[in-house]
Amino acid sequence: MADPVSWLMITPGWKVLASDGSEVGEVDEVVGDSSVDIFNGLAIATSAFGKPRYVPAERVDEIAEGVVRLNLTPDQVEQLDEYLEPATSAEIDADSKGGLAESVGAEARELEGKVFAPTQKQEHSMNIWRRIAFFFRRLFRR
């Protein structure tokens, strides 16, 4: 395998290999916070029309240019949970002044939080064009 690279280099479309070297999918999304260098894991596409699966960072064995090797067998990859995008969160500070203005402000912040920062998890939907490209790449590699 090529020289190792940082998780920050991973991009959608990179090959994902099982511990035995067999290709088990491709990277759909990188999960982490680059501003503080925290790598949480990957969402990988294992089939053209299936939902992406979540691979925790501790299951990533090696990262090289264009390839991510896992410390999982192909069967273990098939058993991974579906990837769900993390929920966003909102922090709402209470005003220290009382009265109608506080009540209206609190309601506005609560509404804003519900609209712009839902707190429940949402399913990840892989872009249809990437799914089609994935399907044809897998079809012609065989």
Image: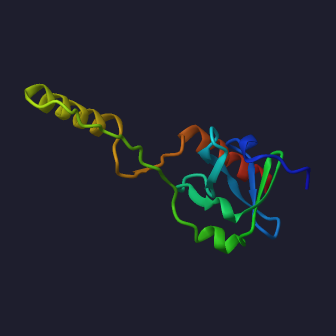
> In this orientation, which residue lies closer to the viewer: 114 or 105?
105
Taking the image as shown, residue 121 lies to the left or right of residue 131, namely: left
Q: Please identify the quadrant where the N terminus is shown.
A: bottom right
> In this orientation, which residue lies closer to the viewer: 32 or 125?
32
Taking the image as shown, residue 4 lies to the left or right of residue 103, namely: right
The tally of labels here is: 0
Residue sitting at 34 percent across and 48 percent down?
119
Quadrant hosting residue 58: bottom right
Residue sitting at 29 percent across and 37 percent down?
93
> In this orientation, which residue lies closer to the viewer: 23 or 66?
66
Q: Residue furthest right?
A: 2
x, y percentage for residue 6? 78, 46
- Residue 117, above or below 78: above
Taking the image as shown, residue 55 lies to the left or right of residue 120, namely: right
- Looking at the picture, the colour scheme in use is rainbow
Quadrant hosting residue 112: top left
x, y percentage for residue 106? 19, 34
Q: Please identify the quadrant where the C terminus is shown.
A: bottom right
- Residue 134, above or below 20: above
Residue sitting at 67 percent across and 42 percent down?
12
Q: Residue furthest top?
A: 101
- Residue 134, above or below 102: below
> In this orientation, which residue lies closer to the viewer: 109 or 142?
109
Q: Residue furthest left?
A: 100
x, y percentage for residue 13? 70, 44
- Residue 42, above or below 130: below
Residue sitting at 35 percent across and 40 percent down?
91
